[in-house]
């Protein structure tokens, strides 16, 4: 199977959010946990998907697990 390539390094915040995605949290739950708006979470998630070349948050969650973030 093809391995996900990282298009750009993730920021600290993106790494935090990706860890939460990997744990199965919703954008709303992530926003509450990190004290940021749902819109901000959505922006970060889109950036993460682009950077790790994932099609959706499920692929991102699998990537996070494989990379040991979760």
Image (cartoon, grey):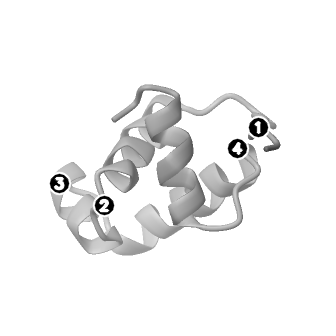
**Mark 1–mark 2 distance (CA, rounded to whole Å):** 21 Å
Say if mark 3 contacts mark 4, CB within 8 Å.
no
The disc placed on residue 61 is none
**Front-most of 31 and 62?**
62
Marks 3/2: CA distance?
A: 13 Å
Q: Secondary structure at mark 4?
A: loop
Residue at the spot x=17%, y=54% of the render? 33
Q: Are marks 3 and 2 in contact (CB under 8 Å)?
A: no
Dot 3 or dot 2: first in sequence order is 2
Residue for point 61% across, 50% down:
48
Q: Quadrant of the C terminus?
A: top left
Mark 1 vs mark 3: give the one in front. Answer: 1
- Say which mark, if any, is on residue 33: 3
Disc 4 packing (10 Å; few <14; some 14–19; many ≥20): many
- Looking at the image, is mark 3 or mark 2 nearer the viewer? 2
* Secondary element at image label 2: loop
Earlier-in-chain disc, 4 versus 2: 2
The residue beneath circle 1 is: 3
State the separation of the CA atoms marked 4 and 2.
18 Å
- Labels 1 and 4: the sequence-earlier one: 1
**What residue is pinned by disc 4?**
52
Look at 74% across and 40% down and name the residue there. Answer: 4
* Nearest the eye: 50 or 32: 50
Residue bearing the label numbered 2: 24
Between the residue at mark 1 and the residue at mark 4, the CA separation in whole angstroms equals 10 Å
Q: Is residue 5 left or right of residue 32?
A: right
Q: Dot 3 lies on which element?
A: helix
Q: Pointer 1 and pointer 2: residues touching (CB < 8 Å)?
A: no
Front position among marks 1 and 2: 1
Check contact, mark 1 vs mark 4: CB within 8 A. Answer: no
At 82% from the left edge and 42% from the top edge, which residue is drawn?
Answer: 2
Q: CA distance from mark 3 to mark 4?
A: 23 Å
């Amino acid at each position: 199977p093809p391995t996900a390539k990282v298009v750009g390094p993730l920021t600290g915040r993106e790494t935090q959010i990706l860890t939460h995605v990997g744990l199965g949290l919703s954008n709303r739950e992530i926003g509450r946990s990190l004290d940021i708006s749902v819109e901000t979470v959505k922006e970060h998630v889109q950036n993460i998907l682009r950077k790790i070349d994932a099609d959706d948050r499920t692929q991102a969650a699998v990537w996070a697990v494989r990379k040991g973030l979760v």
